[in-house]
Amino acid sequence: MDKNSSATGSEYKSSSGPRKPSFGLAIVPLIAMALLLGVGYGVYRIKAQVLLIAAAFITACLGTLLKFSWKDMEAGIVESIRKALPAILIMLSVGVLVASWIASGTIPMIIYYGLKLISPKYFLVTACFVCSITSLACGTSWGTIGTLGVAFIGIAMGLGIPLGPAAGAIVAGAYFGDKMSPLSDIPNLASVTAGSNLFDHIKHMLWSGVPAWLAGLIIYFFMGLKYGGQEFDQENIQLITSTLERNFNFNLLLLLPILIVFYYAFTKKPTIPGMIISSVVAAFLAVIFQKTSLVTVAQAMNSGYSAHTGVEMVDRLISRGGLMGMMETQLVAFTAFSFGGIMQKIGMLAVILDKIMKFADKVWSLVLTTIGTAILSALITGSSYLSMIIPAELLADAYKKKGLAAKNLSRIIEESGGIIVPLIPWSMAGVYITGTLGIPTFSYLPFAFSNYLAVIILAIFGFTGFTMAKKIRDDETQPGS
């Protein structure tokens, strides 16, 4: 008599119950998803979550053919989403945090003083560094590129600096800050999909991200020497700084919300309470220093901060955050986990994983497989989110079997997937950057050094085993722990 009510992984019922899928059948949902996203998302710009629902439906139909009930598949979806709920709560907390930090003047103050670091002699280094600081503070590469990036391109044109290197420095800086910022959706989603703690993930990524970034700065320094020594028109930068100074009151106490988050991070206290406390403190600072009302701050926490400075580029830079601002990411995550939950419940992921593991039997080959899967997903989907979600769903169990901490996986999928996407011409990021800066992707691609140097460093780590952290206990990678 069969003791199991449903099939999971490699456990299946007798011939009268659910059947184990063949490898050929198991890859059908992946092919269907690649076609749906490649054509629907890549060509027609249909929302990724709609296409993922279609892919999940196709997978469910195949599950029915394998004699799985909808109740079984629904259980797989629920279990997949349940594992991600703690980190999803963190993502929602981030939305509240960003809005409150902007309303208090914390983020505007960081941007203001970051811009003061600009040096006309070392343009490329300065552009990369300032975009890094701004994106780190705001948690948005697109916002940084669409505001400061445009200003820097204008400066580069006036100086006669080649626009390819200028755009490369801007993109590299913006995406370095983005991937290292706890306010950004990319590291949040990477940690969600891989099952790692957000701050453990960011700290682990320092090993690959910082050397790549520093190498890029050194290259920019020597490249920029032949362009340096000229004075340039700082009108755009002056406009941003004067607008921020006119609309916000700066005070050292505005750094308090940041210190609270850093304290919780470095003392390994629960993440969500730290974010909520920081947001509450920021709300009161907004009342004290920015002379706004708690009602206005509460509305910003829900819908996002809406700036009305009278200067469009400043408004675009700091109008963001809020619970509703995180919903697009949440929908992609929910639909992707629905697809992955069904794939896992009906045994398709186990079959695919068995094939992959025949190559990925060593740590180095597992790392290379992860890098290759993330880059392939990025090329097919053009989406930072999906290029992280797909390899994470496929390979999470492989890292567990090797005794490797989940933060290894989250680091690799973010560096090889999310940060490679802006270098792909047909990706949404590539299209956005080209449209915003007016520079073709292939013109800035060679000069976005830190974006691809990090991938090379990770491959070296895979071969040497350096920084490949071991899993110490079962609950160490749970988000929010």
Image (cartoon, helix red, strand yellow):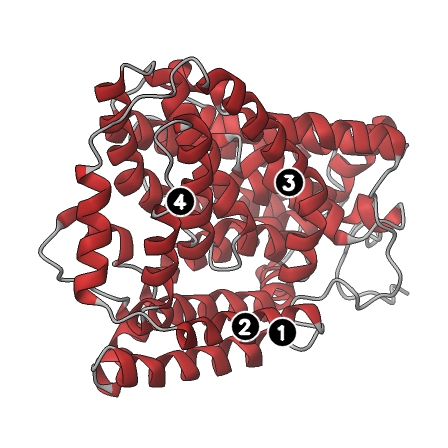
Mark closer to the chain start, 3 or 2: 3
Distance, label 3 to label 1, CA atoms, is 21 Å
Q: What is the number of the mark on residue 117?
A: 4
Q: Is residue 352 above or below residue 319?
A: above
Query: What residue does disc 2 label?
Result: 259
Circle 2 sits in a helix, a strand or a loop, which is it?
helix
Q: How many C-alpha atoms fall within 10 Å of the one at disc 3: few (<14), some, or many (≥20)?
A: some
Total tally of numbered discs in the picture: 4
Give x and y (percent) for residue 245: 22, 61
Using the rendered image of the protein, determine whether residue 235 is visible from the camera's viewpoint.
Answer: yes
Q: Residue at x 60, y 42 (%)?
A: 414
Whether residues under marks 4 and 1 lie with C-beta atoms below 8 angstroms apart, the answer is: no
Q: What is the number of the mark on residue 263?
A: 1
Circle 4 sits in a helix, a strand or a loop, which is it?
loop
Give x and y (percent) for residue 469: 84, 49
Q: What is the number of the mark on residue 11?
A: none
Whether residues under marks 2 and 1 lie with C-beta atoms below 8 angstroms apart, the answer is: yes
Circle 3 sits in a helix, a strand or a loop, which is it?
helix
Distance, label 3 to label 2, CA atoms, is 21 Å
Camera-side residue: 167 or 256? 256
Camera-side residue: 391 or 447? 447
Give x and y (percent) for residue 299: 25, 77
Distance, label 4 to label 1, CA atoms, is 26 Å
